[in-house]
Amino acid sequence: MPWQHAVARAIFNKNAMAAAGFQVERDAPGATRIVLNGQWSLRDLDNDFARLRRALKPYFADANIHWDLTQIEQLDTAGAAVLWNGWHGQLKDKVALTDEQAALFETLASIPNPTVEKSSRFNLLKLIAAAGRLTIFMSSHLRDFVSLLGLLVMELAYLLRRPQDFPWREFSANVYKSGVTALPVTALLGFMIGIAMSYLMATQLRTFGADIFIVNILGLAIIRELGPILMAVLIAGRSGSAMAAQIGVMRVTEEIDALATMGISRILRIVLPKVLGLTFIAPFLVIWTSCWGLLGGALSANLELGLGYRFFFDYLATVVQPVNLTLGLVKGVMFGFIVAVMACHFGLRIKPNTESLSRSTTSSVVTAITCVILIDAGFAILTRSIGV
């Protein structure tokens, strides 16, 4: 059949003896034939199989196109794979081949399709890689955290030998910023939580005629659990984030490097005052928050159940054992220490860019709150038979 060259003619190889190319030919009735020429092999460095694949993609989708490979000078597995994948692994009946080319495509057809196996293997490898990255990430955090604790212990040992070097100014500043300035918000939150709890419990206790037991429930819940937890969550979101951001800004502005250049310990002047200051003030914040929570509970109990304020607090002293207050104070010390250490840990890991600053500040708050809740749960299990 005589073939005529169409107006639309795609030639990717002007030199027929060089790189791979193809021509689009059309006869009078409108049938289309793709004539491949040149060297479809890796021996020619000018071959761009990715570009050829993109150019042939519209023709691969047309099942009525004839393919002529007889004018190809050399065809290896790389060039054949481009055509084989474009034909979706099926040799069409409208393809003109030489005997050597037919044998090459038969070899490609004999290779099993590894799509499913490769996909499952790929997913397994991705899972292993993700587990490895997570392990490396967690181990680096654990290493830096243990290192920070060791440095804190060393600085405390140094201060025991040289108490005159204790950073009183930094310590008092952190006590003021973390404790004194937090009094209004902790009081407000404790008061509102006390009112909400007392109001909800009063509705249920009135149903069973057990109005007086609201004192027992509020006393144990606020003094032993809610007071320390509320304090820890507030200082983690307020003081902990501020500590991490402050240390991060000092990292970005290279102030910490300047301290190291001058021979000043960053742990002694930056980290230790924050940890000691928050650990010292946290128990007082627990008492402050618990008092306001009980005051809010007493107000709601008076309005809803008619319990007098004097009766509420007198009966509270008889039903809530003093050991519960001790447990609350111990929790306050632990939570204050955890929040401060986590804030300093993430602050010291901040890199000199704004994205790392925001990410590490958020991570410090989330990690501190998570650790506080986990420690509180373990502490509650260990002390479940004390003071109840």
Image (tube, rainbow, N blue to C red):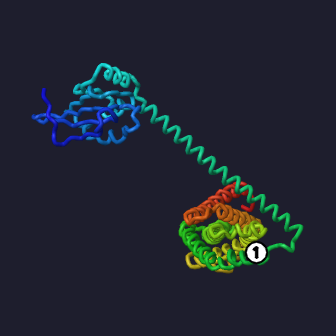
Query: Compared with residue 335, is residue 381 higher up or lower down, i.e. above or below?
Result: above
| Closer-to-camera residue (274/164) | 164
Residue 174 place in picture, x, y as percent: 71, 75
Badge 1 local density, few (<14 within 10 Å), some, or many (20+)? many
The C terminus lies in which quarter of the figure?
Answer: bottom right
Query: Compared with residue 144, is residue 257 higher up or lower down, i.e. above or below?
Result: below
| Residue 234 visible, this angle | no
Residue 221 place in picture, x, y as percent: 65, 66
The secondary structure type at the circle numbered 1 is helix
Q: In the figure, residue 83 lies in which quadrant?
A: top left
| Closer-to-camera residue (285/34) | 34
| Closer-to-camera residue (319/151) | 151
Q: In the figure, residue 163 lies in which quadrant?
A: bottom right
The residue identified by callout 1 is: 171
Q: In the figure, residue 60 lies in which quadrant?
A: top left
**Residue sitting at 27 percent across and 32 percent down?**
36
**Residue sitting at 42 percent across and 32 percent down?**
116
